[in-house]
Amino acid sequence: MADIFDEVSEELKQDRLVQIWKKNSKYIISFFFIIVVLIISFQLFLNWNEKKLEVSSQQFFNALEKLEEKKYEESFKIFLKSSTEENEGYRVLSLFGLAETNFKKGNIEEMSLNYKNIYEDTNIDLYYRDLSRILSVMKDNVSTFDKQINILKPILNSPSKLQLLAAELEIMLYVRSGNVNDAFTKIKNLLKRPDISLEQKSRLELLNKIYISNAK
């Protein structure tokens, strides 16, 4: 008797499942269809992103090759195109590439604007923004002393990884502008810092000796 009830119960369960399926089958099928589409779409996106990254990489290194071959107009066009990339890494590298191309062409003002676009872009990592400030000053032989010092100030007044390099560059600006006494004071202060490297210390000591010998 118990077996009969079990069979009846099982049949009722199956009938109920059939009814549920008939009532909700289109929703269940739609749900699984969406899941499958999402999985396929995600895989396609990964493949597309990988190919796009390969294209960006090839494009950037092609621009570098043109730059080394002194084909500046070609390298500039490629770097300009790459500077609009969605990939942040190649976008920033291409901005540096634009600046270097203009430097090679002798367009110092354009180069300065390229670097300014980098160090004023708060979406770019601070290290690269500081690096663009230093390169802008190092390669600029036309801007005024005050303008170049103002470019370096954000690095000099912050605990940047490039602060010591910026401080050394500041000394060179003082020397180049003829402010030798100020440069000498900056050298002495910088030599007192315990965090300067041996290489930097050697350069500063050499400058110090040159100053002392000229003062005599």
Image (cartoon, grey):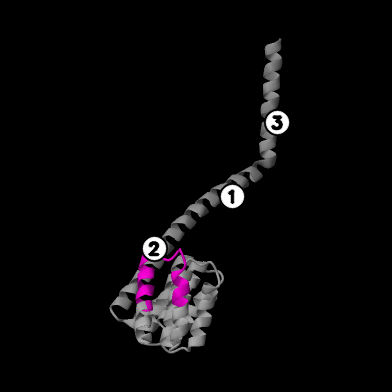
Q: Residue furthest left?
A: 69
x, y percent for residue 136:
45, 80
The kind of secondary structure the magenta stretch mainly shows is helix
Q: Bin the neighbour count of mark 2 within 10 Å (Cα to Cα): few under 14, some 14-19, many 20 and up.
A: few
- Which is more foreground, mark 3 or mark 1? 1
Q: CA distance from mark 2 to mark 1?
A: 30 Å
* Residue 54 marker: 2
Q: Residue at x 37, y 73 (%)?
A: 205
Name the residue type under label 3.
Answer: Arg
Name the residue type under label 1.
Answer: Ile
Q: CA distance from mark 3 to mark 1?
A: 26 Å
Q: Which residue is mark 3?
A: 16
Q: Which residue is mark 1?
A: 34
Tell me which label, 2 or 1, sits earlier in the chain: 1
x, y percent for residue 85:
47, 70
| On screen, residue 39 above or below 210 | above
Name the element at disc 1.
Answer: helix
Pick the residue in front: 41 or 183: 183
User: Is residue 192 rendered to the left or right of residue 28?
Assistant: left
Q: Residue at x 45, y 63 (%)?
A: 195
Magenta part of the chain = 186-208
Q: Quadrant of residue 202?
A: bottom left
**Is 142 contained in the magenta span?**
no
Q: Can residue 115 be spotted in the picture? A: yes
Q: Are marks 2 and 3 in contact (CB under 8 Å)?
A: no
- Which is more foreground, mark 2 or mark 3? 2
Pick the residue in front: 64 or 159: 159
User: Is residue 27 rendered to the left or right of residue 195?
Assistant: right
